[in-house]
Amino acid sequence: MREEEYLQSLHFNSLRLEDGSIVNMSLPIVLAIDDATKEAIGESPDVALAGQGGDLVAILRRVQIFKHNKEERIARTWGTTAPGLPYVEKAIDPAGDWLIGGDLELLEPIKYNDGLDHYRLTPAELRAEFDRRGADAVFAFQLRNPVHNGHALLMNDTRRRLLDLGFKNPLLLLHPWGFHQTGRRSLGRSDGAAQEGEFHFKIKSFVLEDGVLDPETTIVAIFPSPMHYAGPTEVQWHAKARINAGANFYIVGRDPAGMGHPLEKRDLYDPDHGKKVLSMAPGLEKLNILPFKVAAYDTAQGKMAFFDPSRAKDFLFISGTKKRREPPSGFMCPGGWEVLVNYYKSLQAKEADQKPAPVAV
Amino acid sequence: MREEEYLQSLHFNSLRLEDGSIVNMSLPIVLAIDDATKEAIGESPDVALAGQGGDLVAILRRVQIFKHNKEERIARTWGTTAPGLPYVEKAIDPAGDWLIGGDLELLEPIKYNDGLDHYRLTPAELRAEFDRRGADAVFAFQLRNPVHNGHALLMNDTRRRLLDLGFKNPLLLLHPWGFHQTGRRSLGRSDGAAQEGEFHFKIKSFVLEDGVLDPETTIVAIFPSPMHYAGPTEVQWHAKARINAGANFYIVGRDPAGMGHPLEKRDLYDPDHGKKVLSMAPGLEKLNILPFKVAAYDTAQGKMAFFDPSRAKDFLFISGTKKRREPPSGFMCPGGWEVLVNYYKSLQAKEADQKPAPVAV
């Protein structure tokens, strides 16, 4: 982003295009540089972007360099400047005091060679895949936790409701967040972040292999965006990015992209604000928002089921299963559970040294 | 505002109306109440609003009470949560933890009986006055400082430029900010705030009486809005409110509604952001923004003149005249200067006890 787009994003959560149309854009997509890099660029109109190995990956044309007012960016994005926001600590605090924007010319698709590149589909590739499969509706589910059978229940139920509405072939875009982008700076290339991504995708494979979700009507891809935990501001980006990728239905729950206040014993955001803000967001007028139904483990049926408040005592909530060595039967497919248990064991071993990655069950 | 409008204002600086049109609204207009008042209201659908003397002034119909998340409101409005923001300290910190919104039914125009009520014109009254005078263009000037001859030069020059553009009868809306609203809570009814307003208006009368501005083409009215010093967020409100009152040209300068950072030795806002944000603001697409030309005291000519960088040494900037006992001849009309000197003397006498009101020359 150049400054004009950056300011519109911060102040209006949307951009006005030259033809007068409005595009939602609630998080600025910016590249920070330090004084030395700014100095080195000088008056050059075009700048090469190098990968971690020094390989040329893109060219930024007709660049503009402008001030990175971190405090203002943080305040307007998170609605707080309290210390302890994970994305701020990882990606903004250590970043340079300047931002550089321009026309981005990617030289070739970026590969990570970690065995997951086939999950890295561009919006155009995703749209083409939906077309190829003849989708007449695409629903997306923003997932930051490992898929368990409660999620699967919700996704299968959503498909059924769309069929009831008259759609013939509604497809699910299962689009969990990526990792290289979040983890790179703080965790290094080869540990936590990539490991966490692999863990997510291993579980997903089991979910599909075990038939919990139907591979024919499900497309799994990496959402290449770091979690900001920016609540009502971020949920717009989560929805807008999926619209870009071809989705027209978006499932949103309570307190999307929320977190606890870093300093106070309360939620950082009003848990209802995410859905409210999303429903009024500029540029998202045509989005169909689907409610998130809460699923929990139904001890009476021995499986995950939608919560029924009339017999609340029968339900175990997911958080209650977090610390168990064995899942209740029917909580998650067995292969997925094994991956999850091993992953958390490895995290616990590291906990003395570093904070756990922001993953919860 | 009810919560739906409040959230749109905070997140998008604009409201989407039922017909799909967009209205700029960058500052939330809200009424805070405390726990006891919330309790007293209970489930009542309608609430009476009383003036300071207990007199009924309005009814708020079909009320909604929602949380007043002060930290988030401050962060998203000012882009900082640093202590020391004047409006926050006066009007938000001491306010209640709830906001109440509804349909406002004003029972009759509110009078302050301070001799200035005839300057309190509603937007509809201002539009009617412009029509009565046959204006074909109205230009507005947001003024937080006493009118001096440099301002007058700018305003007269703007009128000339509009005539050059082919307008036959461009009128000036001289619309300085009001005072009762800012001052009421912290200063009490009878001192600083009202005194400051009187001072501003006394100067304005002299400016008009002395013919520095032409009363035929100038309308003076009180802008009944407290200064927030919220920079790029507030300047939109300054412009939008004047559009509501019939203006179609708006003069904007460097760092509008800006202030120094409360804790750091820098401007709180990038001085160029106000104009940039204003030029891109949703709902203000039809606003004509006029640049503010800088005037200074030209010692060579012995009068206020537009700054000419080629002979910079000839110019005295206004800030340099602040501490003088006598103005340079031609800085301000004599009657106005006398009011100004007396006002600042009275302020200095009070300075030991309290902070000065936020007025600068």
Image (cartoon, coloured by chain):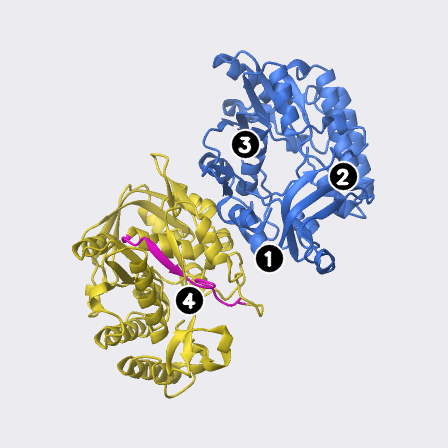
Chain colours: A blue, B yellow
Chain letter for the residue marked with disc 1 in the picture: A
Mark 4: give few (<14), some (14-19) or many (20+) Cα within 10 Å.
Answer: many
For the residues marked 2 and 4, what is the alpha-carbon distance in whole angstroms? Answer: 53 Å
Mark 2: give few (<14), some (14-19) or many (20+) Cα within 10 Å.
Answer: many
Residue plotted at (56% across, 68% down): B266
For the residues marked 2 and 3, what is the alpha-carbon distance in whole angstroms? Answer: 25 Å
- Three-letter code, disc 4: Lys
The dot on residue A253 is 3
Instruction: Residue A346: name its quadrant.
Output: top right
Q: Is residue A208 visible?
A: yes
For the residues marked 3 and 1, what is the alpha-carbon distance in whole angstroms? Answer: 32 Å
SS class, disc 1: loop
Q: Which residues are magenta?
A: B245-262
Q: Earlier in the sequence, mark 1 or mark 2?
A: 1
The dot on residue B293 is 4
Q: Is residue A300 visible?
A: no
The lab-note entry on whether marks 2 and 4 share a chain reads: no
Q: Earlier in the sequence, mark 3 or mark 1?
A: 1
Please count the marks in the image. Answer: 4
Image location (x, y in percent) of residue A9: 53, 46
Residue tagged 2:
A193
- Three-letter code, disc 2: Ala
